[in-house]
Image (cartoon, rainbow, N blue to C red):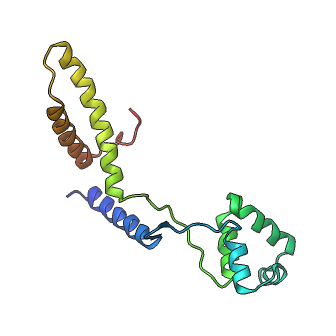
Amino acid sequence: MSIKKTIQKQYQRIVNEAATHFTKPTGIVQKPAEGWIVTVRKALGMSGVQLARRMGITRAAISQREKAEPDGGITLKQMQATAEALGCHFVYAIVPEENIEDIILKQARRNAKTIIKRASGHMALEKQSLTNEANEKIISDHADDLVRDMHSNFWDEK
């Protein structure tokens, strides 16, 4: 295995491991409707004024953060600082909906189908069409090759 592939496998392991920590049997942990700042602050029984004092900012700034968070209008830096003031850890992650290797394989199959479809069109013109079963085997084999080689244009739309 090449160094590039080894490094990629290490990244895949990190992402897959993170995904297991951020999911429950029922799915991804959902953000509360009011947002995490309001929810945690209220769970702690802390007022907005008290949080503002802890952070050295105004109550209006806390209110602005609390209103901005549910819509994604707060910076990661602000979330980090607010979480710390609440005695919490701020966690930020991009969690795949499925195993990262499966996402790669789906892309490889899409690429392989596009390539094989073009070739099949030429073969049909020459009356050398393959059966669906034969085409599926070729697509599967080609997808495996694409995953193994992963050229720089792997994720380009074709």
Which residue is rendered at x = 40% and y = 38% of the image? 156
Q: Which of the 4 image quadrants contains residue 45?
A: bottom right
Which residue lies at the image location 13% right of the left edge and 18% below the top edge? 128
Q: Is residue 118 above or below residue 103?
A: above
Q: Residue furthest front?
A: 26
Number of numbered discs overlaid on the protein picture: 0
Residue 145: where, in percent of width, then height? 20, 44
In the rendering, at what x and y percent does residue 13 appear? Answer: 34, 66
**Horizontal side, residue 59 vs residue 9: left or right:** right
Residue in the image at 70% along x and 73% along y:
37
In the image, residue 47 sits, relative to residue 150, either above or below, namely below
Which quadrant of the figure has residue 90? bottom right
Q: Is residue 36 left or right of residue 146?
A: right
Q: Nearer the viewer, residue 55 or 107?
A: 107
In-front residue for pair 48/5: 48
* Quadrant, the N terminus: bottom left
